[in-house]
């Protein structure tokens, strides 16, 4: 075992396990659902009195991931090397692929640092020019809206946008359809918005994009790790996501899906060692890989991506469908609990199909920053303030380390503040 010792950490519920294999053995015979999720909760360093509800901001790493990374850091320092094991990189991609679709191939995945990087790879490589139009929402994360503004300033593209949070799923599709012109080259938006946790109807949007021969790119940072999906069936051409949120992996890890048939449309613009299949500098020869590997470059933090692999294994052991049912049940319980508090205004969608595991709200006539500070102070409940797009609310994210008692606890604290 490493420095963490597989448990016995002051102030933390123990019975933790140092690898996905040990975790699998521990839960294999558990049939009681509450007991199962308590064992999952025990894998985290989160203190018993600290309620963490901000996976949408940053995921907490469970012990199996920390143990893997600690070992990997030590191993790489015991025998330093300048590069990474490219064959093992393909194994990692095989383990990540099912999180975005059972038919996704490792050759369609590039290992990258963040979803932000993936979105920039698409936008920079697509060759957008002055007059080209891009459709998005006003509820995008800075990972997308800043690159879009940068393009607008430097290439002269036109950004056509809409506010999604007051629309049903069908209305979202209709609104996008009405924004499309003959100059529209790309629809690019979040799978789940970071503001109100709105689950956008990407399958219907993908069908619309295909029918109009428009490219479709999705920011999956708030979906990958809790939401079963099939990017190919949804008609998504490019899907950028990160490892440090719902996958519970390390920071500065992520991956980009580029449909095999669309890879020649996205020219690599930031390249280096590992991007090339062949290069001959003296003869001016350069050939990129015939796969999404062309978007990878330079020296990587190998222990971080081994940690991402361990995170994928950990989440796979639980099962994505089981994660989805657990997370949604907690979020729905919280949503309906908020409905019973008269002073609370719920900002997340009323339409069930448009809700996710993140619920945003505010207390009427109370500054949202004050409410957030009160929750995070003596109550030790970590939520996320949402100033983006003028939402001015508080977002609670529910994931595998949360239990039904956590919903009861935050609702009780909100009632005290109301």
Image (spheres, helix red, strand yellow):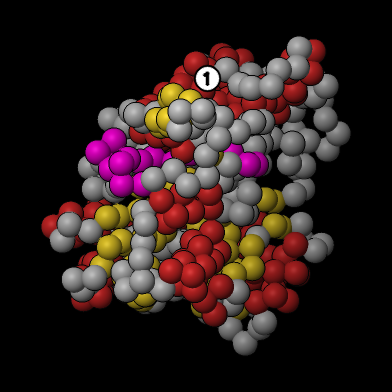
Residue at screen point 74% across, 28% down: 14
Image label count: 1
Q: Is residue 6 visible?
A: no
Q: Is residue 159 left or right of residue 305?
A: left
Across and down, in percent, residue 5 comes to: 80, 19
Indicate the position of residue 144 as horizontal and vertical percent values.
49, 61
Would you say residue 258 sits in the magenta stretch? yes
Q: Is residue 23 above or below residue 230?
A: above
Observer-nearest residue: 1 or 260?
260
| Residue lying at the far left of the rendered structure | 211
Q: Quadrant of residue 17?
A: top right
Q: Residue at x 79, y 13 (%)?
A: 78
**Furthest-right residue in view?**
10
Q: Please tell me which residue is depicted at 59% across the width and 70% down the height of the picture.
A: 386
Q: Please give left or right for residue 13 compared with residue 232 in the image.
A: right
Q: What residue sits 58% from the left and 42% below the top?
A: 113
Q: Which residues are magenta?
A: 251-266
The relative height of residue 358 versus residue 325 in the rendered view (above or below) is below
| Whole-percent x, y for residue 380 in the image | 76, 57
Quadrant in the rendering for residue 319: top left
Is 235 in front, or is 321?
Answer: 235
Quadrant where the N terminus sits is top right
Q: Quadrant of the C terminus?
A: bottom right
Q: Which residue is mark 1?
A: 86
Question: Does residue 56 show up magenta in the picture?
Answer: no
Evaluate whether residue 376 shows in this view.
yes
Which residue is outermost to the front?
282
């Amino acid at each position: 075992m490493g420095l963490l010792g597989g448990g016995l950490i002051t102030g933390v519920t123990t019975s933790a396990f140092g690898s996905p294999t040990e975790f699998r053995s521990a839960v294999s015979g558990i049939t009681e659902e509450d007991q199962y999720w308590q064992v999952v909760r025990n894998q985290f360093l989160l203190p018993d009195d600290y309620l963490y509800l901000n996976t949408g901001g940053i995921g907490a790493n469970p012990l199996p991931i920390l143990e893997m990374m600690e070992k990997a850091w030590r191993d790489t320092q015991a025998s330093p090397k300048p590069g990474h094991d490219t064959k093992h990189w393909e194994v990692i991609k095989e383990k990540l692929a099912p999180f975005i679709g059972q038919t996704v191939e490792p050759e369609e995945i590039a290992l990258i640092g963040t979803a932000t990087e993936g979105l920039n790879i698409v936008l920079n490589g697509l060759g957008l020019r002055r007059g080209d139009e891009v459709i998005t929402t006003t509820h995008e994360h800075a990972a997308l809206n800043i690159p879009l503004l940068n393009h607008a300033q430097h290439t002269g593209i036109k950004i056509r946008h809409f506010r999604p949070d007051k629309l049903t799923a069908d209305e979202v599709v209709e609104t996008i359809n009405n924004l499309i012109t003959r100059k529209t080259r790309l629809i690019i938006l979040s799978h789940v918005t970071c503001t109100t946790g709105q689950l956008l109807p990407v399958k219907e949007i993908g069908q619309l994009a295909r029918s109009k021969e428009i490219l479709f790119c999705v920011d999956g940072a708030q979906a990958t790790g809790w939401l079963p999906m099939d990017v190919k069936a949804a008609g998504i051409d490019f899907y950028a996501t990160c490892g440090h949120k719902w996958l519970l992996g390390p920071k500065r890890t992520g991956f980009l899906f580029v449909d095999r048939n669309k890879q020649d449309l996205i020219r690599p613009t930031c390249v280096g060692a590992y991007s090339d299949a062949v290069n001959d500098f003296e003869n001016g020869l350069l050939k990129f890989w015939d796969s999404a590997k062309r978007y990878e470059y330079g020296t990587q933090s190998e222990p971080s991506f081994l940690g991402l692999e361990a995170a994928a294994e950990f989440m796979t052991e639980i099962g994505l469908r089981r994660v989805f049912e657990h997370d949604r049940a907690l979020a729905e319980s919280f949503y309906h609990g908020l409905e019973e508090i008269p002073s609370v205004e719920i900002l997340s969608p009323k339409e069930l199909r448009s809700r996710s595991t993140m619920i945003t709200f505010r207390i009427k006539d109370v500054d949202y920053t004050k409410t957030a500070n009160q929750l995070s102070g003596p109550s030790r409940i970590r939520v996320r303030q949402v100033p983006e797009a003028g939402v001015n609310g508080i977002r609670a994210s529910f994931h595998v380390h949360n239990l039904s008692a956590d919903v009861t606890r935050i609702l009780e604290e909100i009632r005290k503040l109301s």
